[in-house]
Image: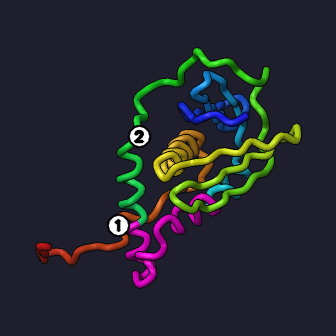
Amino acid sequence: MTSGLHQITMSYSVEDDRLLLRISTTEKSEFQFWLTRRFVQVLWPALLTAIEQENSGNKLALQPAAKQAVMAMEHQQAVGASDFTHTHDEGSKKLTAAPLLVVGGSVIPGKGGVTGLVLKTQAGAEIKLSLSKELLHALCKLLVGSTMKAAWGLDLTVGDAAAVVMPSGETRLH
C-alpha cells in the first residue's frame, strides 16, 4: 500500500520500556511500532549519516567542529517547519491489533531530499517510509525527546550547536 504520511508521533511506555512510534497516513490508516533501546541505539548513527549526506557537497571544506555546528543549525531550521503541538489524531484505523515490534531496518540516504526508512518487524513485515528532509529531522527530534523521557542514557543529539564558540570579548559582524 502506498499512502502519504499524515502524522508521526512518539511516546514512551514505562510498562514496556519501549517507544511507541505511531504513523498515520492521509488515508486515515495507522501503523504502530515498538522501538527498543537497542534498536534506537543502532538506528541513530544511520539517521545521522543520512542527515550528514543531505547537503554534503557544500560542507566538504569544513572542519569537523564546523560541520557539527552547521548540522545543528540545519536541524533546528528543519524542525522549526514542523508542528509538535498537536496530539496524535485518534480517528485513524489501526492496521494491527497491537504495535509491531521492530527488530531491524535500514536507512537509505536520500537523493533529491528524500530518505528511505525501512522498518523490519518481528512478524516479518517490512514497512517502507519516504521521509522528506523535514520529516527526517522531525523523526530525529521525536527520538531525542522520547529517549530523554525514557532515561535510556543514549544522549542523542543532531550536530553540536556549541561546536563553534566565539572568543569572549570579541564581536564580529557579517
Count residues near mark 1 (Cα–Cα under 10 Å), then give few for <14, some for 14-19, many for 20+. Answer: few
In the depicted structure, whether residue 124 falls above or below residue 113: above
Queried whether the magenta region covers residue 60, the answer comes back as yes
Expressed as whole percent of the image width and height from the top left, the position of residue 163 reads 37, 71
Badge 1 or badge 2: first in the primary sequence: 2
Whether residue 145 appears in this view of the structure is yes
Element type at marker 1?
loop
Q: Is residue 41 left or right of residue 74?
A: right
Q: Identify the amino acid type marked 2.
A: Ser
Q: Which residue is mark 1?
A: 162
**Residue drawn 61% across the image and 21% down it:** 28
Q: Is residue 165 left or right of residue 110?
A: left
Residue 147 location (% of width, % of height) = 58, 45
Mark yes or no: residue 17 visible.
Answer: no
Q: Quadrant of the C terminus?
A: bottom left
- Residue 84 vertical placement versus 144 (above, below): above
Q: Position of residue 86 (x, y in %)?
A: 44, 26
Which numbered tag is attached to residue 66? none
Q: Amino acid at mark 1?
A: Ala
The residues tagged by marks 1 and 2 sit, at their Cα atoms, a distance apart of 23 Å
Q: Residue at x 65, y 37 (%)?
A: 19
Count of residue discs: 2
Q: Which residues are magenta?
A: 45-70
Side of 164 where 84 appears, left or right:
right
Q: Nearer the viewer, mark 1 or mark 2?
A: 2
Which type of secondary structure does the marked residue at label 2 adopt?
Answer: loop
Q: Which residue is mark 2?
A: 82
Chief secondary structure of the magenta portion: helix
Q: Is residue 25 magenta?
A: no
- Which image quarter: residue 21? top right
